[in-house]
Image: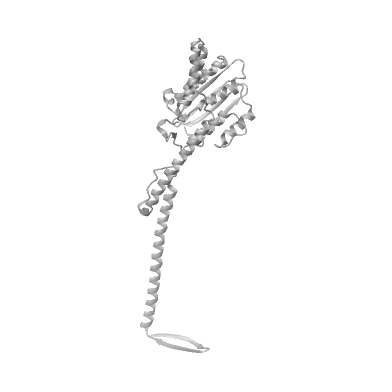
Amino acid sequence: MGAISAACSPGRWASSLRPTAACTAEGRGAAMILFLLASALSICALLLLRAAWRYRQLYRYLMALDVSQLDAPAPPPALARFSPVHGKLRSLLLERRAQDVTHRQLHFLALQEQINPHFLYNALESVRGKALCVGEYEISDMTEALGNYFRYLISNRSPIVTIESELENIRTYFRIQQFRFGGRYRLEICFDTDPLEIQPCILPKLTLQPLVENAIMHGLEARQEGGAVSIHMTATARRLIIQIRDNGCGIPPALLRRLNSELSALPPTEDGQVLKRIGIRNVSQRIGLVFGKGYGIQLSSIESVGTDVTLTIPRFTRADLHDGLPLRREGMDCHAP
């Protein structure tokens, strides 16, 4: 038997007797309730932990996705239900890639058309033929050079060319300038490595000619005794560095700083305030559109000594072309050797 006592009033106590079995049954019932409650809470906690683990896996999977990669990894087995989402994501990536390529091609071609002349190659051939008939061989040679230059512009519709073909066009262009200036200037082309390793590399068409033209117009024309333009090419494992140097009048320091500032911050659709010369601005914009951020033009100059234009682009060949343009690698360190 169990006894229960309680104070009724000061100095008085009351007590009652209960069977011990009844007390034990109540204790067991309370313990069972506590056990069931603890079990339910444990099951809920396990379910919540499992759900949190799955969502953590989903979060890691989504964060690991690179929108620039079409071969995105499939979701882990625990997320098999998201396989249709993975397929839809791949389709969206393909659509985005196609739209991006189309936009870049259209914008690139629109910029290039600012440089492409609109002359008739057949008319030049007619002039050349008549010059030969009357013995004007110098006129014939100049017309032939112009014809070759325009053929390069008109016949080759690809916006991307090899270094070899671009240099051949530079030689043709310089030949035309020799006729114009009476042979006052000379052209030098040199390579740090075997030319056969550099010539297959690619770059946008008409990248070098506007820079050589700037060297003549803004550097050499002010010199009475003539001058020289040199093109120096250096190749590393990942980059191609092209330096165009003239021994002309140079650029004042204040203007040089402003030019480099505009070149480093020039957006693809905005004209610079200082870069009124279409050639260097156009080349800088096209380099950015084709290869992405981190590549372009840097100027260095000393007044009365000359100017260096350094062009840095990734070392690509035609094997790197995708839909007619190089596959941009925004994450690639352009300063890596």
Q: Quadrant of residue 67?
A: top left
- Total count of labels: 0
Where residue 71 appears, x then y in whole percent? 39, 43
Where residue 92 appears, x then y in whole percent? 43, 46
Q: Which residue is nearer to you in this view: 217 or 73?
A: 217
On screen, residue 52 above or below 259: below
Q: Residue at x 40, y 76 (%)?
A: 30
Where residue 336 appears, x then y in whole percent? 47, 34
Where residue 22 appears, x then y in whole percent? 37, 82
Q: Residue furthest bottom?
A: 12
Q: Quadrant of residue 280?
A: top right
On screen, residue 106 above or below 243: below
Residue 13 visible? The answer is yes
Q: Residue at x 54, y 26 (%)?
A: 210
Q: Is residue 300 left or right of residue 70?
A: right
Q: Residue furthest top?
A: 135
Q: Residue at x 53, y 33 (%)?
A: 285
Residue 194 visible? The answer is no
On screen, residue 213 above or below 65: above
Q: Which residue is nearer to you in this view: 111 or 337?
A: 111
Which quarter of the figure is the N terminus placed in? bottom left
Q: Is residue 271 left or right of residue 149?
A: right
Q: Which residue is nearer to you in this view: 94 or 333?
A: 94
